Image (cartoon, helix red, strand yellow):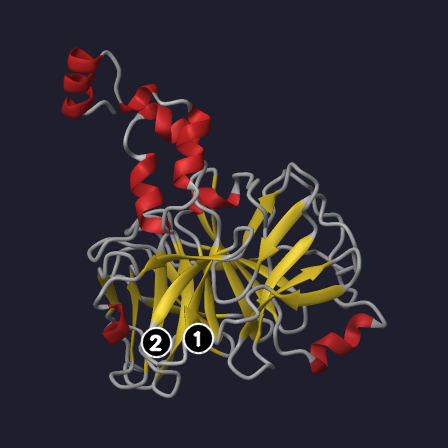
Amino acid sequence: MVSSIDRSWRREYGYAWDDLPPELVALIADSLPIKSYTRARAVCTSWFAALPPASPSALIRHDHPRRFSLTCLSSPPTTSTTLHESISTVLPPSSRGFFICSGDGWIGVYSFDNSMAFLVNPLTGEEIPFQHNLEEKRQMVFYKVVFAPNPTPTDFTAAAITGCARITYTIDGNRGWAHIYCPRDYIADVVYREKDGEKLVYCLTESGDVLVLRLPGDKAAMPAVFEPLFHATAPAFAPPYDTIVRTDCDKYIVICDDGTTLTTGCWLAVKDLNGYTVFVGKNNPVAIRMEDGTGNNVYWIDSSIAGRRAKRFDLATATSWLCFPDAQACCSWYFLGDAQCRVIFKNGL
């Protein structure tokens, strides 16, 4: 990762860009917008090592319905980048569409104008439409989508909630869409994970049960199948939390890949996430291990407040507060890549 410019500078002046002290590189990069920051990490090996992945961001809709920005969860929060010039024509006004996913640098949108869902990269403007030939083409709404990293227009793996108890999935881009129905209950949330070569979609039901949807390993394999994650006969929500089933429509599941063995199928109230900070919403849920002891927080989007506001919930104190008090509306959390799930942020979450 050494450019010809670096080599010529070293010949002429005896030093090059990769000779800069890491502390100086980090100091300069702290003020860069997210797109420039990402480019700076790619300059050379030493800069890549000096600069951690960009902090999580929120996609903010401003007063004007066609103006969006990415605002970084740094301290203090900063507007991290100006989005691609075509993004305002792709992201819909709230009256004609809604956001259905985000992850790996992409954001998903469903448009009522043409009954179509698609991914869009807000930094480049690249689009990946979800086109299928299923019978319910005009009637099928994509409510939430999760997908494998590094999708392309011709090759991607994705799974979507498209009905109360229905998952629509593909492992072969737009050529492979198919349905599967949950055998137990309505589906509240989904999360995508790859483990030991398997493509897994964890499905949380309204009653608190969790099913694992194992996607086919290749295009010629058998259809996807559901398997129970819990082998328990007791209700998933023990009293007094059993009222959640009837009163709370927003339920999310986050998978922390720490090797923990599940011994019970009953959800418990906790005040310690074992050092994790989690992000839930339309994004593929993310869990981040915090080394500096500032974990045990849940970042979520409060849809009960007019305009949808980004909030942070502290489990220890059981209190929430606004992440961006001056922001008009938070559409979704935004992450540049799946590697964000495993890195440690030290710049003020």
Residue 311 drawn above or below residue 41: below
Q: Amino acid at mark 2?
A: Tyr
Q: Which residue is mark 1?
A: 143
Q: Are marks 1 and 2 in contact (CB under 8 Å)?
A: yes
Q: Secondary structure at mark 2?
A: strand
Q: Position of residue 272 (x, y in %)?
A: 76, 50
Q: Residue 103's image quarter? A: bottom left
In the image, farthest residue toward the front? 13
Q: Residues within 10 Å of mark 1 (few under 14, many from 20)?
A: some
Q: Secondary structure at mark 1?
A: loop
Residue at the image position 39 percent from the left and 39 percent from the top: 29
Residue at the image position 21 percent from the left and 58 percent from the top: 153
Quarter containing the N terminus: top left
**Residue 313 - label:** none
Residue at the image position 62 percent from the left and 70 percent from the top: 251
Q: Would residue 263 be found to the left or right of residue 151 on screen?
A: right
**Residue 110 - label:** 2
